[in-house]
Every structure is written in structure tokens, then in C-alpha cells.
Image (cartoon, helix red, strand yellow):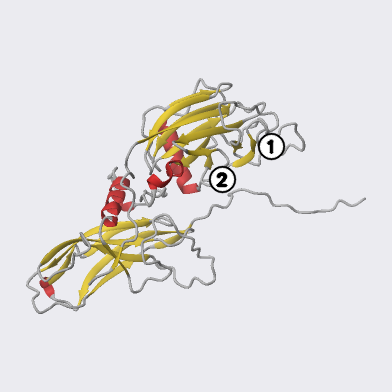
Amino acid sequence: MKTNKKIKKPSTRCTEPLPFYSTIWCDDHTDVWIGNCKKLNTEKPIKQQNHPEPESFEAVGKCCDYIYFVCWSNDRGANGFLADLTYGSNKVLTGDNANWEVFATGIDFDNSSGRPNKKLVESQIKIANCENWTKPFVGNTNGKEKNLPRIPQINSNARYIWFDSRLDTSASSSIRVPFKGFNHNEFLIFRLPLRDLFGDICHDCPCSKCDCDCNDCDGCNKQADEQNVTLRYRALDKEFTEPSTTNKNCGKLPSDGNCDFQIANPNIKDLSPCFYFEWGDGASDSIEEHDTEVVYITVCNPFNDIRYKGLKITKLSITPNQGDQIKIVPDSFICIDCLEPCSCVSREFTMITRNCKDLSGEFMLEVDYCFESMELITTAEKHGKARFKFNVTTD
């Protein structure tokens, strides 16, 4: 059984520490951290900045890391955040990249004497993964936002960003809301995926999704995210990929991080996940009559607005059944549990063939699976206003 050859493998530099340079300014305070979706890499911030001075620093990150900027104001005057990140000829500025995100924690810090510690920041990142990160409010460019200064050390195309809590209902102000000094549910956490800064080096790198800690299978395994990524790399290293014959809404190859299906699309009739069989150690490899092959089953979520919960492979079987002559191990109860939007998860198996002379030919590997529920993921704002008209009449 020969299958389609992989078109593209991930960069060999996906896990390499890469140095980059950054300059930041905030009115009033910023702590800078680097880490993955849940954990920060250091016990203390890699840089701290306090108004009125900008701070420049060199840092190291990997393709699957995020850089986090924890920002807060003193609720007076004007507030806003600027950042200028550089890697070689690549540059990312605040306001110029669609993947800038922010989460408002609602935990107030007004000065630099007390700062959010690692434990607090990590706890808020986990909450943000469940309650959804949102897009920051984007203002004018550096030096052109009213009542906010020009910072010469930062590129003039960088735009001021902040979070608009919509709690400040001031009718008029010399400073534009939300940059007008006010506690907009601060402190705030801004983040950017470093793969956007590193560019082509990070092509097709499989990274853990920022899920909502719903992985019941993780248990006490603190390395679950890293191990899931490792299994995904091993699967990608295989030569051949076979999409399931029952796949719907699925491409020929797993889509790690790239999908645009939504369940709201009226043309979508099937909400099933996508399954792939990945195997082969070279272009000339084959499953022979006496063989032991390490293979992978990869399951992908092709939708960007749902999460599968309680996903499990309940049984794997080979038809026609040849008993112990052709078998796959393990063959039942393989836990995946959470499958995040636009993500893929791989599980490792061994296919064993013994004494299969005169049995060569086509067989079918069948994967039975189930999931407990699908959860709608939305980036819609979780606050708003309802308005009603009423009349007051004369007595």
C-alpha cells in the first residue's frame, strides 16, 4: 500500500533558540515574559519597564513560544503600549500584525512597587485560554496619537494599542478613549506568537494549541503539551500520509494550524474530525510480509470555531482479519480528549506482520472513535450594551 508523498516537512530549526531584539514603551508599566500557552520560561520577567523610559533588550525564543507583555497604568493621564520587535530583516510592530492579542485580567496594579508575579500571570494566561483572547484596540502611529508621546527609539509605524473595556463612557475628552487614563480592567496581558517574528524558519512547525485545560488524559503529566508536540514531529517525519477514505471537509494532508471551516457555514453537513495514517522511513519503504513498522494515526480538527472534548480512539482493526499475522499495537482505548480548533494530534502505534506469505494485497485499517461533546469557540466580545427607548409624558 503506497500513499501520497509528503509535500513539505517542517523546518529543522523549529526547536532552535533564536535571539531577537525589542524596544518597548508603556504608560505606565510593563513586565516582559516568554513562554508557551501555559508556562513561562523564567521565574522573573526578562525585562521590566516603567514610565517614562522606554526599554530595549535582547531575548531568546523558539518558534512555538509567545512573548507576553504584562501592562498596567495608574488610571490617570494617558495610557498606551508600543513595541518594536526585530529578528534579522524581519520586524513586527504593535498594531501591524493580526495576531496581536490581549486579555484583561481585572486585577488592578497602580504602580511599580507591586508587580504581578509568575504564578499570577500563568494563572491569568490559563483563564485567557478559556475565556478567549481578544484583539487590542489599535490607535494612531507613534507620535500621532493625541496626548501620547513619540518614542524615538521605536519605529514610527508602530501603533499605540490598549484594551477598551467600554467602561469609560466619557462624552468628550482631549484624550481618545480607551487611551484616556482609566482602569480598563487592568492589568492587561498582550501577546504575540514569535513564529510571526521568525518567519520562514518556523514554517509548518507543529505547536501546542492554547487549550482550556480540558485534557483529562494529562492527569499529573506536566509534560503533556511537549509530548504531544514530539509525537506530532515524529509523525511528520514519516514519508507517506494516507487520508481516511471517509474524511469529509479534509485535505490530503493534515492541516496543523491552517483551516477556515466554520460550523456556521450552511454547506457544512459533516462535523467529523479528520484522520490520517502516517508511515514509512523512506521513499522505497513498504509494509512487507514480515515487518515491524512504527506508524502514526493523526487526527485533525478542520474547524476554527469548535473544540472536540472527550475524543478517544476506541478500537483499531484490520480487515480482512488475519489474527496475529497482521496486527496493530495498541488496538484500543487511545485517549486524545481535547482537540483544539485548527489543530492536529498524533498517536504512535506499531504495525506487525508475521508469516504473511501469500497474504500480500490490500487491507483496510479501520479506526473507531467517539467524542463526548463539541464546544463552540468564539472570539466575539463577551460584553456589550442593550438599549431601550421609553417616553416620559406630561402630567
Q: Nearer the viewer, residue 346 or 88?
A: 88
Image quadrant containing the N terminus: bottom left
Q: Which residue is depicted at the point 50% across and 38% down?
A: 91
Q: Percent x, y for residue 149?
A: 65, 27
Q: How many marks?
A: 2
* Circle 1 residues within 10 Å: few <14, some 14–19, many ≥20: many
Query: Is 240 situated above or below 16?
Result: below
Query: Is 171 situated above or below 294?
Result: above
Amino acid type assigned to the residue bearing label 2 in the image: Lys
Residue 187 seen in render: no
Q: Which residue is depicted at the point 84% across and 53% down?
A: 391
* Circle 2 residues within 10 Å: few <14, some 14–19, many ≥20: many
Q: Name the mark on residue 32.
A: none
Q: Which residue is mark 2?
A: 135
Q: Is residue 299 left or right of residue 378?
A: left
Q: Earlier in the sequence, mark 1 or mark 2?
A: 2
Q: Percent x, y for residue 292?
A: 13, 63
Query: Is 143 situated above or below 343?
Result: above
In three-dimensional space, the C-alpha distance between marks 1 and 2, rounded to whole angstroms, equals 16 Å
Q: Percent x, y for residue 50?
A: 54, 22
Q: Considering the numbered disc 2 on the image, is that residue within a helix, a strand or a loop? A: loop
Amino acid type assigned to the residue bearing label 1 in the image: Val
Q: Is residue 282 left or right of residue 127?
A: left
Q: Which residue is mark 1?
A: 177
Q: Which residue is depicted at the point 38% across and 63% down?
A: 372
Q: Nearer the viewer, residue 308 or 256?
A: 256
Q: Nearer the viewer, residue 33 or 361?
A: 361
In the rendered image, the residue lying farthest to the front is 89
Q: Considering the numbered disc 1 on the image, is that residue within a helix, a strand or a loop? A: loop
Residue 284 seen in render: yes
* The image quarter in which residue 28 lies: top right
